[in-house]
Image: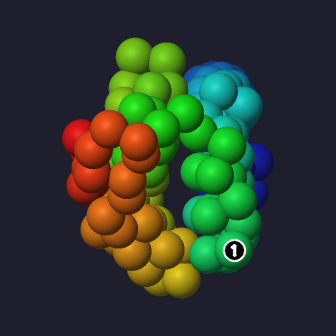
Amino acid sequence: IRILTDTAPAEEPFRWSLSLISRILTRVINEGSTIVMKAINSNSGKQLRKAVGCAPRGKRALWMLNIQVGTQSISPLMWAIETGSLDAAKSIITDLLIIRADRDRYYYGMD
């Protein structure tokens, strides 16, 4: 920035804004780094299946559809599609569409 401007007062606000952005991004990465998001970021369907395999039965679909980061909530499925992690997105969709059963009943998707 020193090359683009010769005034010191313009440099300090720019430095402050970059510092703020880096702190926000660090917080988002630390708070939102669940095992599902790590699998999506590596675009690995195998890691994703392993990650949701340890989810409680009633929470399995929720782990793939909604993650709370601070006051914001994001969808791992949408994140996978938007970032081009298509192997992980395919694994999420396949897992959501599987019909499962327990001793009492069959269930599907979010049920």
Q: Where 110 falls versus 97 (above or below)?
A: above
Residue positioned 43% across, 79% down in the render: 90
User: How is the protein colored in the picture?
Assistant: rainbow
Picture coordinates of residue 41, whole percent (x, y) = 65, 64
Mark 1 neighbour class, 10 Å CA radius: few under 14, some 14 to 19, many 20 or more: few
Q: Nearer the viewer, residue 100 or 16?
A: 100
Residue positioned 39% across, 74% down in the render: 94
Q: Nearer the viewer, residue 70 or 65?
A: 65
Picture coordinates of residue 72, whole percent (x, y) = 38, 26
Q: Where 48 falls versus 16 (above or below)?
A: below
Picture coordinates of residue 24, whole percent (x, y) = 60, 28
Quadrant placement of the C terminus = top left
Name the residue furthest front.
103
Question: Which residue is labeled 1 in the image?
Answer: 46
Residue positioned 41% across, 45% down in the render: 102
Tell me which amino acid carries mark 1: Lys
